[in-house]
Image: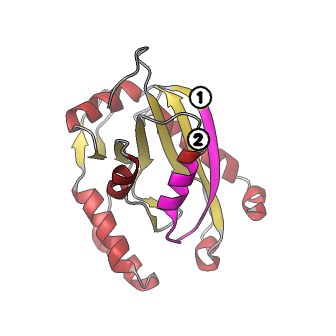
Amino acid sequence: MNLGLSGSLKVVGIDEGYFPPEFKRKRLQTILVAVLCDWTTPLDVKISRVTVDYDNINYRVLELLGKFKVKSDLIILDGVTYAGFNVIDPKTLNEELGIPIITVFKHDLNMDRIRTALCKHFNDWRYRFTVIRSVYSNSRIIHTPWRPLRISVYGIDENKAIDLIIRLQKVSPIPEPLRLADVIASGLTKNSGLLNML
């Protein structure tokens, strides 16, 4: 990954919005938000819809990234599950895009509980569980000035990733592009009126 002559770094943070529990049974939709920043300065926002517990999150992410006019240098994801158990595969995304990806886990995962939930509700639970387990087992806890974070990295040196995470922390432990994506996605879906329009 090369910084531009101006020292810019185009980073995209991606997160999903809130949805009520009944959306799981009905396979309804919430929103997916991608925020493009130059380091911690927001430049652009793209929004898409994503079906709860479906299997199209990789496609939706590719679709969102394609809407930006500039190519990103780095993508930061919020964990590996979006909109319920719509499972993202950062390794595959990295291979398809050629863009480094850092997955940030805000909370530790209980793999036994995840496996039980997947077995109960999904015919393709083995695939979903394999991706989750692979990404999580690839993760490690890093220390930052704010607090420890758990991350997994693809297509980027781990030490470089740690340095970037720290430099992208602005007002919280969560890297600013990802924090902004969370704020926007959560803010837009707090009112169920928007979700009912999807």
- Residue 110 visible, this angle: no
The magenta stretch is: 44-64
The residue drawn where x is 40% and y is 78% is 118
Classify 99 as above or below 6: below
- Image disc number at residue 96: none
Q: Where does the image place residue 8, in percent across and percent down from the top left?
A: 44, 21
Tell me the quarter of the picture where residue 41 sits.
Answer: top right
* Left or right of residue 20: residue 144: left
In percent of the image, x 40 and y 15: which residue is there?
A: 5
What secondary structure is found at the residue carrying circle 1?
Answer: strand
Magenta residue check for 51: yes
Q: Where, by quadrant of the figure, is residue 45 drawn? A: top right
Q: Amino acid at mark 1?
A: Leu
Residue under numbered circle 1? 43
99 relative to 50 in the view: left or right: left
Q: Which mark is residue 183?
A: 2
Residue at 41% x, 34% y is: 73
Q: Nearer the viewer, residue 195 or 94?
A: 94
Residue at 33% across / 78% down in the picture? 126
Question: Is residue 146 positioned above or below 136 on the image?
Answer: above
Q: Residues within 10 Å of mark 2 (few under 14, many from 20)?
A: some
> In x, y percent, where is residue 148?
28, 38
